[in-house]
Amino acid sequence: MEGKVFTEEQETLVAKSWGVMKKNSAELGLKFFLKIFEIAPSAQKLFSFLKDSDIPPEKNPKLKPHAISVFVMTCESAVQLRKSGKVTVRESTLKRLGGVHFKSGVVDEHYEVTKFALLETIKEAVPEMWSPEMKNAWGEAYDQLVAAIKAEMKPSP
């Protein structure tokens, strides 16, 4: 995965769209997760707070804060990508994310579904800015974040 360059144009597209979406990150984060569950209902079983719950996900009080933090972290990491030349999520956070995703049994298909849901969420959030170039920019940023998480996906010591 090393060597894939995130260009200045891509950085601009990501930063511009994130600038618009940021103020709605609560609503968009939730939308993003509900899209994931719509595409892959079984993904709910990966979340401890959802798997034994009778409450529909959109009413679950624990989903929104989780959805917001994931959405914001993903977008912020995309914006920082070129400046730092790598995914800038704190190393401890990456290790924790890797461990949690490993333990929960997250597999490649889940990352694919999540990528699709993320791109759809962004497309709906900034329809007037959306373009094939923007889709590629966000897709590339997401792929690099996932590669960094996967590199840490192992049992915790």
Image (tube, grey):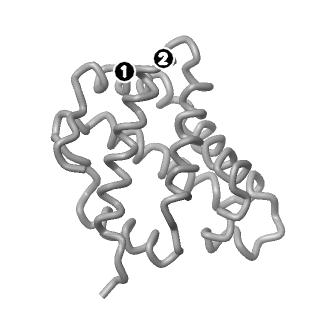
Q: Secondary structure at mark 2?
A: loop
Q: What's the residue type where badge 2 is placed?
A: Ser
The residue under label 1 is which amino acid type? Leu
Q: Position of residue 70 (x, y in %)?
A: 48, 51
Against 139, residue 35 (above or below) is below
Q: Nearer the viewer, residue 112 or 24?
A: 112
Locate residue 121, reporting x and y percent. 59, 34
Q: Is residue 155 left or right of residue 129?
A: left
Q: Residues within 10 Å of mark 1 (few under 14, many from 20)?
A: many
Q: Earlier in the sequence, mark 2 or mark 1?
A: 1
- Left or right of 128, for residue 16: left
x then y, percent, for residue 151? 29, 65
Residue 55: x percent and y percent? Answer: 81, 64
> What residue would you read off at disc 1?
13
- Judge the density around disc 2: few (<14), some (14-19), many (≥20) Cα neighbours within 10 Å: few
In the image, residue 107 above or below residue 20: below
Secondary structure beneath disc 1?
helix
Give the quadrant of the C terminus: bottom left
| Residue in the image at 61% along x and 43% along y | 32
Marks 2 and 1 in Cβ contact (< 8 Å): yes
Per the rendering, the mark at residue 131 is 2
User: In which image quadrant can residue 125 be found?
Assistant: top right
Depth check: 53 or 41 in front? 41
Q: CA distance from mark 2 to mark 1?
A: 9 Å
As drawn, the residue found furthest toward the bottom would be 157
